[in-house]
C-alpha cells in the first residue's frame, strides 16, 4: 500500500473526509475507489458512495477477498445510514465470515454491530440482544466501543431500562472522546437527548401530563393498571393483555380507562369503537358482545360493570387505572415516529420496520404529504421520505416490538 493510500485511510479514520479525497480524488485503482466511496458516504452522497464501492469491489482481484469484504461492509453501513433496510443481510453475513476467517476481527465485529443496528430498527430486539452478547468490546478500538455502547443503550431504551441506557451512553461518550471523531460524539449526544425528551403522555382522572422514558419505566413497574395506547395492550405488573390485533376491544378499553373512576355512556363507546353516528338496537347488541369479549380478556386485572348510562371499569384489589398515550396523537403517527429520526426513508424500509404492507405505508405517506407533514425526493426506487422534527414526537422506542415468534 503506497503512502497516499495510507494517508487517506488515516484521514478517514479520523473523520477528515475532505483530507482523504485530496489524496485519492484523481486515482482509479481499487484501493483509491474504496477510500473515495467511504469519503463520499461521510459527506452524505450515498448514491455516489455506493457506486464507487461497487467499482472497487469489482476491481479487487480474486486473491483480495478481504478487500472485497470490506467494500461490502462499507456498502452495508451506507445502506443502514440511508435506511435501505431491504439491503440483503446475507451479503453482510458472508462478508463478516470472510473477515473472521482472515483474522480481521475489528471489521468482523463492526459487521456484527451493523447487523444488530438493523435488527433494532426493524424491532427484532431479542435477536439483536443475542447477537450483541457474543461481542467483547474491550478487545476493540474506541470507535467500535462507541458503537457497542450506542447499541446497548438502544436495546436498554426499548426495554425501558433507563439506568442501563444511561450507563451505556456514558461508556459510549467516553469511547467517542477517545476516538476523537466529532461525528461520533454528535451521534452519542443525539442518543442521550432521547432520555430527556417526552416519550409519552399520562392520562389519569381527567388530567394529562408528559412523561420521560424513566417515568414510563416507573409507571409500568407500579401496581397501577395501565392502558398502553403506544403498544395497544393493558397491563398490571406481570399481567399483560395484548389487544394489538383487536382494535375494537382496545378502543373500548381506552375509553373506559380515560373515564375511570367514572363510567362511559353507551353512545360514546359506540362512536369511539365503531364510528357509529346513528345508533340503533343492532349497534347496542354489538356493543354488548364486544364488552363481553373485553371482560373475558381483562378478567385477571379488572371487571367491567354495566351502569345506567353505560359501562365502567372496576379494577381488582383497588388499583388505579391510567392511560399511557403518545405525546402527540394523529393519524399515521407510527409512520411519523420513524421519520422524525432525521434520516430519509424509503416506503419499503418503513413497511419492513412497521411490519405492514408497502401499499399501506405508501397510502399513509401520500396522506401525510397532502397535509404537508412529510416531503419526498427522488423517483421510483430511489424515492425517499423525510420530515422536519415534529414537536412532541420522541422516537420509535414505545412502538410495538417483534416477539421471538414473529
Image (cartoon, rainbow, N blue to C red):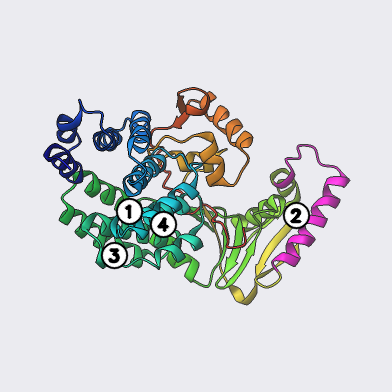
In front: 118, or 140?
A: 140
Residue 201 placement, left or right of 389: right
Tag 3 or tag 1, which sits nearer the N-term? 3
Rendering coords of residue 348 (x, y %):
54, 37
Q: For label 1, count other residues whose C-alpha is less than 10 Å away and answer few (under 14), some (14-19) or many (20+).
A: few
Tag 4 or tag 2, which sits nearer the N-term? 4
Q: Nearer the viewer, mark 1 or mark 4?
A: 4
Residues shaded magenta: 273-298
Residue 225 placement, left or right of 171: right
Q: For label 2, count other residues whose C-alpha is less than 10 Å away and answer few (under 14), some (14-19) or many (20+).
A: few
Q: Give the position of the N terminus as an image quadrant.
A: top left
Residue at point 52%, 52% (across, down) = 399
Q: Characterize the magenta stretch by its predominant secondary structure.
A: helix
Dot 2 corresponds to which residue? 309
Rendered view: 357 above or below 173:
above
Residue at point 49%, 34% (across, down) = 346
How far, Cα to Cα, is label 2 from label 3?
61 Å
Q: Nearer the viewer, mark 2 or mark 3?
A: 3
Residue 15 placement, left or right of 316: left
Dot 4 corresponds to which residue? 97
Amino acid at each position: 500500500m503506497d503512502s497516499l493510500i495510507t494517508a487517506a485511510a488515516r484521514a478517514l479514520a479520523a473523520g477528515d473526509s475532505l483530507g482523504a479525497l485530496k489524496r485519492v480524488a484523481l486515482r482509479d485503482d481499487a484501493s483509491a475507489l474504496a477510500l473515495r466511496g467511504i469519503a463520499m458516504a461521510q459527506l452524505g452522497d450515498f448514491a455516489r458512495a455506493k457506486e464507487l464501492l461497487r467499482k472497487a469491489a469489482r476491481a479487487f482481484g480474486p486473491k483480495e477477498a478481504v478487500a472485497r469484504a470490506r467494500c461490502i461492509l462499507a456498502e452495508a453501513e451506507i445502506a443502514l445510514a440511508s435506511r435501505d433496510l431491504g439491503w440483503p443481510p446475507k451479503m453482510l453475513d458472508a462478508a463478516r465470515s470472510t473477515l473472521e476467517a482472515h483474522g480481521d476481527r475489528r471489521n468482523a465485529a463492526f459487521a456484527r454491530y451493523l447487523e444488530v443496528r438493523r435488527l433494532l430498527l426493524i424491532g427484532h430486539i431479542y435477536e439483536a440482544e443475542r447477537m450483541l452478547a457474543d461481542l467483547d468490546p474491550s478487545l476493540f478500538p474506541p470507535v467500535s466501543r462507541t458503537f457497542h455502547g450506542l447499541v446497548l443503550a438502544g436495546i436498554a431504551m426499548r426495554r425501558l431500562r433507563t439506568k442501563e441506557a444511561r450507563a451505556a451512553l456514558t461508556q459510549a461518550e467516553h469511547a467517542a472522546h477517545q476516538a476523537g471523531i466529532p461525528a461520533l460524539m454528535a451521534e452519542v449526544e443525539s442518543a442521550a437527548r432521547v432520555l430527556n425528551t417526552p416519550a409519552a403522555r399520562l392520562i389519569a382522572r381527567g388530567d394529562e401530563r408528559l412523561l420521560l422514558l424513566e417515568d414510563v419505566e416507573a409507571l409500568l413497574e407500579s401496581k397501577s393498571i395501565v392502558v398502553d395506547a403506544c403498544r395497544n395492550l393493558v397491563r398490571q405488573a406481570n399481567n399483560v393483555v395484548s389487544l394489538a390485533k383487536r382494535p375494537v376491544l382496545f378502543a373500548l378499553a381506552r375509553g373506559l380507562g380515560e373515564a375511570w373512576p367514572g363510567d362511559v355512556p353507551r353512545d360514546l363507546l359506540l362512536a369511539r369503537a365503531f364510528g357509529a353516528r346513528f345508533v340503533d338496537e343492532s349497534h347496542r347488541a354489538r356493543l354488548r358482545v364486544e364488552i363481553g369479549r373485553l371482560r373475558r380478556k381483562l378478567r385477571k386485572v379488572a371487571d367491567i360493570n354495566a351502569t345506567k348510562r353505560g359501562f365502567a371499569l372496576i379494577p381488582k384489589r383497588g388499583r388505579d387505572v391510567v392511560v399511557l398515550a403518545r405525546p402527540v396523537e394523529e393519524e399515521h403517527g407510527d409512520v411519523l415516529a420513524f421519520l422524525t429520526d432525521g434520516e430519509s426513508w424509503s416506503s419499503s424500509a418503513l413497511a419492513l420496520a412497521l411490519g405492514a404492507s408497502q401499499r399501506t405505508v405508501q397510502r399513509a405517506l401520500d396522506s401525510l404529504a397532502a397535509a404537508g407533514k412529510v416531503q419526498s425526493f427522488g423517483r421510483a426506487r430511489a424515492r425517499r421520505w423525510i420530515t422536519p422534527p415534529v414537536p412532541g414526537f420522541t422516537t420509535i422506542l414505545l412502538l410495538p416490538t417483534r416477539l421471538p415468534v414473529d
